Image (cartoon, rainbow, N blue to C red):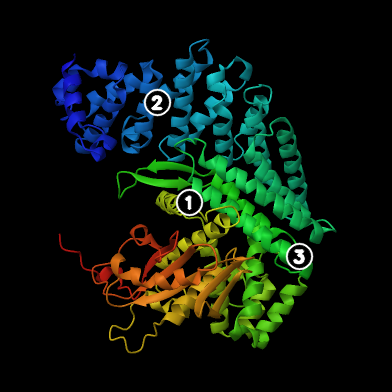
Amino acid sequence: MHEVDRHLADWAARATAAQRRVGPTVNDLGGVAVVGAAAEHLALGPFLPYLLQAAAHQQRLTPDDNALLQEAVLRGLRQQQRHAAFAGAVDALVARPDLARALGAALPRLLIDRLYAAQGAGDDPAVALIGAEAAECLLQLCLAGVVRPAQLLGALDAITEDVAALPEPFAVRLPRMVGILDAHHRGAGLREALERFLALECTCRDAAFELALAHLRDALEARDHSSMIDHLVEVRRRLAELITHAAERLDARIYHAAVDAALTFSGPDAARRVPAAAAALHSALQHYRAWRYHTRAPAWAGPRQSDIAAWAELTTILNAAALHMADDDPWYGDGHTILTALLRAYTANRTVTVVKDTPTAAIVEALVIPAVEDTFLRQESRLRFLHYALDNDEALRSDPAALRLRAALHERTTPGEPPQAGLQAGGPGKERRWHLLAQTLTAAEFAHALQTMPASALDRLEVALRTHEDVIAAVTDPKVGRLMDRLIGQLQQSADWVPGIADSFQVLLEVTVRYAFLCYNIGRDLGGSYTEFLRLRDKAKKKQKVDEDLFHQHYYEVVKLSALFQVVDAEVINHAGGRVDVLVSFGPVRFNVECKIEEEDASEDNLRKYAAQPSEYQNTNASFAILLVLDKTEHAEGTVNLFDSIWIENVQQPGQSEACQVVTIRIPGGRENPSLLQTPAR
């Protein structure tokens, strides 16, 4: 036994779980001399992942004196013949981008060599699988900004010239990677590679699905409604063909159901067909959810809950559309609301989790989301919410200038017309102050609004648009996905977590978590009067209005700008003998959201006292509720982070067979300016 093997065994015996996750240091392996003497043994044997972890630790300690270990790591990645050892090593490498960057240009070259070696693997599955692992490693390093994309894109184009010559274990891993790269690097010619994969029995189904999603992106990026419809018809055709040959492809089924639903809005019999499309999508989601929960996904795939939540939101919107289509509701008449939700599902599917190195932190986990040029859809979405603000804001409904703007928007013959540059009515200063409004209105409409509407009214419209943008903006922190995984995992234990209830509550929970995310991040002057409670403006607490009504009204306004705008009500009187702050109704299934303010003790134990009220309101419905608590205690040393401020309280009365699960979300209010905070004592 090598001396380094004994050190490794001793370390494994005494290391904690946290230490095993980050791997041994050079000292744990006996020191630099011992590791150097055993460099070849570690690099070419089964312990290559531990060599890489030790090299990463040493890189942070002595970045300028790590050449010996770096060379050993490169040799291992170049010559390792054990698939398991190579896979463990590249998994460790992508989590340590600082080491990957330090390895320099030799790293992408040798990984690309492993790709080319897989072409001639013949009957050796290890070489083929190592090539696939090298490709996935390059994909993650490319999206993390460590490796130049051109290197990987060129290699993939070359090795897919003759797909029939590729060994099957290698070929079956490529279509999804090529599809992901095509989503993030448009115009790189990767669709031709996917077309070539259609010729292989082992890859044709995956390639067909990736090509369908590529065409879906074309639809979402269309510049007008008619072009969008043409692309969607092609997407539906491709997905229908795939389902015919692979009925088990549940991912293709749910996309087909969604695209078919979006197209029903363009037909003359939409009022009749949309309810049937909603039922089909709901059924597809139930199968898809079960499939996603029980299928392995690559470590670099985006959070599973983000994908499922996007589909649950789309299903909720389509169900509401099915109820309101006969009313000639402008929210649903053109189907753009459905397409906006479908865009979110697409981006969730194409999102990749990577680890980056930044100037302020050695490693930061991040979500890389493809940049979709959805100019037309985004403009239509803003116009709908501008209509909503003009129709429902009491302060604007009585303003003559606002009424004229509302009429102009209704009469516009070219929806979504972008504003012209260089407005003469207000100049760049006013465009910066009301920039979303300027982007939404035409040049003439914006100029007229500046001349006729008071600044306070323009502020209200800008805040409405900004809040909508914040609500639908993608959360790019993978920790949010893990938080949702934890919450959903607990909620799934309830007997009430069944189709029809689970989807609805997940949408409500997702929107509410995004609301909390918004409250944590909102700027001092960005939320209008409704967000007065989030910042400390009056330390004497004599002038600043902070009360429960203001808090719950802000939450209600945000939810009204989400997928739940047709199913949410505030101040529902005489419900279960009391008054519900916010009630969200999905047909017969209803959930309540209770809002409280705590000024003395906002600890988890103390806030449990508020959980009884929302639990009581659910006694005749599904056993899920939400409790929002505004933490008005002293914040001189800062606030508890978002992820430790969300938990589930189980409230079970004597004689009750199952607890009501109350998701509790603590939101800090009256916060100090961060520059004035004191550091907590050790």
What residue is disc 2 on?
87
Image coordinates for residue 623, horizontal then vertical, percent = 49, 62
Q: Earlier in the sequence, mark 3 or mark 2?
A: 2
Please tell me whether residue 354 is drawn above or below residue 73 in the rendered image.
Answer: below
Residue extending farthest to the right is 268
Instruction: Look at discs 3 and 1 and give the one toward the viewer.
Output: 1
Instruction: Look at discs 1 and 2 and give the one toward the viewer.
Output: 1
Q: Amino acid at mark 2?
A: Ala
What residue is disc 1 on?
492
Dot 2 alpha-carbon crowd within 10 angstroms: few under 14, some 14 to 19, many 20 or more:
many
Whether residue 15 sits left or right of residue 252 in the image: it is: left
Who is closer to the viewer here, 444 or 577?
577
Q: Amino acid at mark 1?
A: Gln
Whether residue 5 sits left or right of residue 328 in the image: it is: left
Q: Which mark is residue 331?
A: none
The kind of secondary structure element at disc 2 is helix
Do tag 1 and tag 2 residues touch (Cβ < 8 Å)?
Answer: no
Residue 621 quadrant? bottom right
What residue is disc 3 on?
325
Image coordinates for residue 341, horizontal then vertical, percent = 62, 55
Dot 1 alpha-carbon crowd within 10 angstroms: few under 14, some 14 to 19, many 20 or more:
few
- The quadrant the C terminus occupies is bottom left
Alpha carbon distance from label 1 to label 2: 33 Å
Please tell me whether residue 266 is drawn above or below residue 392 in the rendered image.
Answer: above
Dot 3 alpha-carbon crowd within 10 angstroms: few under 14, some 14 to 19, many 20 or more:
many
